[in-house]
Amino acid sequence: MEIIPVVPRGYCKGVYRAIKIAKETAEQYPDKPIYMLGMIVHNKYVVEACKLYNIKCIEDKSLTRLELLDKIDNGVVIFTAHGVSQKVIDKAIAKGLIIVNASCEDVLKTHQIILDHIKHGDCIYIGKKNHPEAEGACSLADNIYMISNKKDIDDLPQLHNVLITNQTTMSILEIQDLINYALQKFPSAKVVDEICNATRIRQQAILNLKDIDCLIVVGDPNSNNTKKLKDIAANSIPKIYMIETVNDLNEEMFNGINRLAITSGASTPTYLTEQIIQTIKEYNNTHILNKKPIEIDKILD
Ligand code: SF4
């Protein structure tokens, strides 16, 4: 079996920076409680590893970032890579919390594009419902309309001077279809595609693969960019597995496979992906699947 680690894969600059900021915050405030407002990135092993630095994740999918803040009364709050609205920042300041903002610069760029436009017109934002990045962007103002599918576009009211933009981690294949559909209803809309470079080049690398029998995508099921890697591959690769760690591997996955590719989402720890690649390589040589334990203290390396 030929094993093809896809390049690029794994951590993007925004995730790398958010993790660095979290570690530095733990060093800077050793005597204060430190909270992440939601998962700092969408990977539960990263969240687990943050506990080693006394950083506690406040997460409840049924609550908005604004509501989650009610669970924090003192200490330091870290805003995640997904970005937050000014309302969340203002509320944290009003509560007397120390703010550390790990929002990705690419997300903040989208916020600025939206803020510049909504003074003069309305905004259609293509994103994933209940995703913190979409929540942060759509709570910037009242005239931002979130859509996830064509039905949402059908249901939109009449809008004026429309900007169409999007969440950074959407699929490069799906988004154009939604943009074209929205343009039928709002033909003079301005379109600013905000899929970030990290998402784009990881998805393009999957599209560039040739004659692959099986793709393993490493990442957390809650990670939108990881799921999109799987979606992108669905048209061209017959077998796709989305797994989180080496523990999800089994021998049957490799039956009849000649060319196996491995990639990982932008929020997946390099350590977890490399452990999977090494284990498969060993299996390829020995036909023994030797799964070594996961060492949580290596996750943030
Ligand atoms: S996927 Fe893109 S927008 Fe999200 S953190 Fe990474 S670089 Fe930033």
Image (cartoon, rainbow, N blue to C red):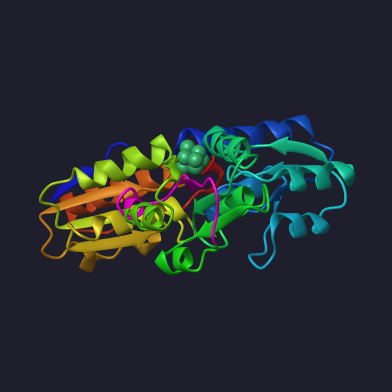
Q: Where is residue 168 in the image (x, y as percent from the top left)?
A: 47, 44
What secondary structure predominates along the stretch shown in magenta? loop
User: In the shown orientation, is residue 83 left or right of residue 233?
Assistant: right
* Location of residue 97 with respect to 236 vertically, above or below: above
Q: Where is residue 250 in the image (x, y as percent from the top left)?
A: 28, 65
Q: How many labels does the image show?
A: 0
Q: Position of residue 134 (x, y in %)?
A: 56, 53
Q: Residue at x 42, y 46 (%)?
A: 188
Q: Nearer the viewer, residue 217 or 293?
A: 217
Residue 43: say if magenta. Answer: no
Q: Position of residue 238 (x, y in %)?
A: 17, 63
User: In the shown orientation, is residue 68 left or right of residue 285?
Assistant: right
Q: Which of 199 and 122 is in front in this view?
A: 122
* Location of residue 265 with respect to 98 vertically, above or below: below
- Say whether residue 89 is visible: yes
Q: Nearer the viewer, residue 145 or 206?
A: 145
Q: Residue at x 37, y 63 (%)?
A: 248
Residue 163: say if magenta. Answer: yes
- Say whether residue 48 is visible: no
Q: Residue at x 39, y 42 (%)?
A: 199
Bounds of the magenta segment: 158-176
User: In the shown orientation, is residue 28 left or right of residue 131?
Assistant: right
